[in-house]
Image (cartoon, rainbow, N blue to C red):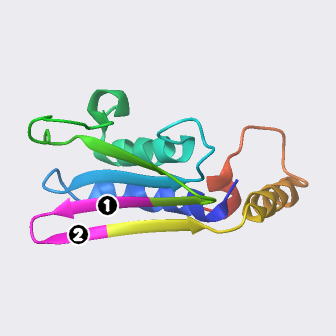
């Protein structure tokens, strides 16, 4: 329900759409030491947004948990890296690494209250709307 993360997903899709496969995509996420899943749901959402922008299915191009001698990176793949430690609420970077340049999109959550604020904004936005299926993209007017 974070407004910033939902905006980051839309930006990720647009940047992936604009840049070709000469730009490798990596999603790097960090959370507190007690989180049990990796990559996080938010990281996967960002990977999905990047895959949509590229017009591919994430499950066919996702690289997770590289370790050891893995060989060269495959063209067009989307990599994921997960960091766990301390009391990190949530940090997500989407890195577009091209020849001679990088574009880095980032969201940092420092307070879990952002999720409640996002939910409240969505609830208030929904007042008076016709029944239907909406998401945060609608709430943000994107």
Q: Residue at 56% across / 53% down in the picture?
A: 31
Q: Earlier in the sequence, mark 1 or mark 2?
A: 1
Q: Quadrant of residue 19?
A: bottom left
Residue 78 on image: x %, y %? 29, 43
Residue 104 on image: x %, y %? 34, 68
The verdict on residue 96 being magenta is yes
Task: Report, in whole angstroms, how far the alpha carbon at label 1 lies from the one at label 2.
Answer: 7 Å
Element type at marker 1? Answer: strand
Q: Quadrant of residue 132?
A: top right
Element type at marker 2? Answer: strand
Residue that lies at the very extreme toward the right in this rendered image: 128
Region rendered in magenta: 93-103
Residue 130 on image: x %, y %? 84, 44
Q: Residue at 55% across / 67% down in the picture?
A: 108
Q: Are marks 1 and 2 in contact (CB under 8 Å)?
A: yes
Q: How would you rate the neighbour count of disc 1 (Cα within 10 Å): few for under 14, some for 14-19, many for 20 or more?
A: many
Q: Residue at 62% across / 54% down in the picture?
A: 137
Tag 1 residue: 95
Q: Residue at 67% across / 47% down in the picture?
A: 135
Q: Which mark is residue 13?
A: none
Where, quadrant-wise, is the C terminus in this rendering? bottom right
Tag 2 residue: 102
Residue 19 is left or right of residue 129, and the answer is: left
Residue 92 on image: x %, y %? 48, 59
Main SS type for the magenta part?
strand
């Amino acid at each position: 329900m974070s407004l910033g993360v939902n905006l980051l997903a839309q930006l990720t899709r647009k940047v992936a759409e604009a840049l070709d496969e000469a730009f490798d995509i990596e999603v790097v996420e960090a959370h507190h030491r007690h989180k049990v899943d990796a990559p996080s749901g938010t990281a996967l959402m960002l990977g999905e947004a990047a895959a949509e922008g590229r017009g591919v299915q994430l499950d066919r191009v996702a690289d997770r948990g590289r370790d050891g001698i893995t060989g060269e990176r495959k063209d067009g793949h989307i990599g994921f890296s997960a960091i766990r430690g301390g009391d990190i609420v949530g940090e997500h970077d989407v890195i577009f690494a091209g020849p001679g340049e990088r574009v880095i999109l980032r969201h940092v959550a420092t307070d879990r209250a952002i999720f409640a604020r996002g939910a409240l904004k969505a609830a208030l936005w929904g007042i008076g709307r016709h029944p239907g299926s909406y998401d945060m993209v609608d709430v943000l007017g994107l």
